[in-house]
Amino acid sequence: MNNLENIVKRLLIIVCMICAIGEGSLHAQNDIHIENLLSQINADSLLRTVTDLQNFGSRFALRDGDNQQVSEYLVQRLQKYGVMAELNSFHKSGDYWLTGAYDQTFYNVRGVLPAVNAIDDSLVLIGAHLDAISYDHETYMPQENAPGADDNASGVAVMIEIARICHENGLRFHRNVHFMAFDGEELGLFGSYYDAQKRYDEGDKIAVMLNNDMVSYQPDDNWRLMLHWYPNAQDIVSRAAEICAQYTNITPVVPPMSENANAACSDSYAYYQSGFRAVFAMEYTFSLSYHTDCDVADSNNYAYLADVARYNLAMLNEYAGLDDALGVETHKAESQMLVSPNPVSDRVMVWCPIPENTTATFTITDMTGRVLLQQKICGQTGSHYEEMDLSGFPPGIYLCQLRTNVWTNTMKIVKL
Ligand SMILES: [Zn+2]
């Protein structure tokens, strides 16, 4: 080795060290931020959602009356937290072993928290089933009440709590985050098969699907969480275990193949079957109240459930990337407006979070500034949808503007 080579090598080492220090400090900053967010996850707030869901009495999808009201409740909760949420219903008929023939509508909930500075067109999906089931395990007679507090109000509560934390901190991610609540899981993953197939047909790219099903029964101090895995996402389950260990008091358990059979028993399996990558979190100690009317809110461990929610938020940060700047400057995120589809041929949906109890003015102008449509909107729920028919507009570019007393946001709409 000659001297010049030696000097170049030394220089390279120094440069690498400087880079390493730089990167380390960036991560440290992000860690402080994420630790602060995780500390805001609140056991009482999780209990509230579980109790609300239990108070529906039954969420059995085939009872008299369906799960539409349950799904509407979840849409409202998500919308209040600035998630663009809506019902996504589908129809199905068949024969169910417990109750016989059925022919009815099921109600998934689909929500989107739009990305800022998107790194690519992949999305990260967090989901849980909203339906429940209960029957006498000796006589196989259906029971009237299906409180489903652990199975699976707990998983739904995780999702709602994450939406709350995002909203209260004005968080956005570098990938779209989709929130899904599935109907008809207990009947054979109906809602997730429907959604996964639809996403496959539409060419959605999913970086990871985070499924939570039965995540609140933890009767002793040895907190553990099963991370069921799929053959196409073994790297994800390894990372999930590291993240769970780093950010929570729960010991993650990645089961060997022989103990991973439950991977096929919940909604993430439907996504796996469509070729998507997923990980499925589930309590380690199986609840004895499973599928009975004893699965009530009082039996859940909410401190444990809060840690499961922390694991999920840390996973979103890992796979969707929290936008740090927006985490600090909340009003920027609140002024986000989304127009879909764009370009548009006839009906367009505009979504905008409006500060509560303020009035906003919504205007569409052409490029010369001529006002074509104007209306006042009252922000009561904190977010607002406006669906408009632009089929009468000539093709061209239009400006869609929302003005509140806090900010003004303008977007271009392309009319085909
Ligand atoms: Zn379940």
Image (tube, grey):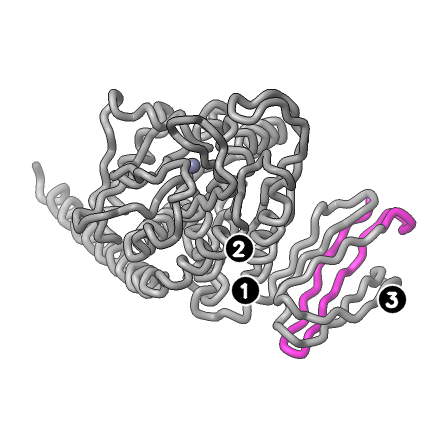
Q: In the orientation shown, which residue stands out farthest toward the front?
A: 139
Q: Which residue is mark 1?
A: 333
- Is residue 375 one of those drawn in magenta? no
Q: How many marks?
A: 3
The residue located at (48%, 70%) in the rendering is: 329
Q: Quadrant of ligand 1?
A: top left
Q: Amino acid at mark 3?
A: Val
The residue located at (72%, 47%) in the rendering is: 342
- Is residue 403 one of those drawn in magenta? yes
* Disc on res. 371: 3
Q: Name the spot of residue 276 as percent of width and height, x first.
A: 47, 29
Marks 2, 1: nearer the viewer = 1
Q: Which residues are magenta?
A: 390-416
The image quadrant where one finds the N terminus is: top left
On screen, 291 above or below 83? Answer: above
Helix, strand or loop at disc 3? strand
Residues at badges 2 and 1 in contact (C-beta under 8 Å)? Answer: yes
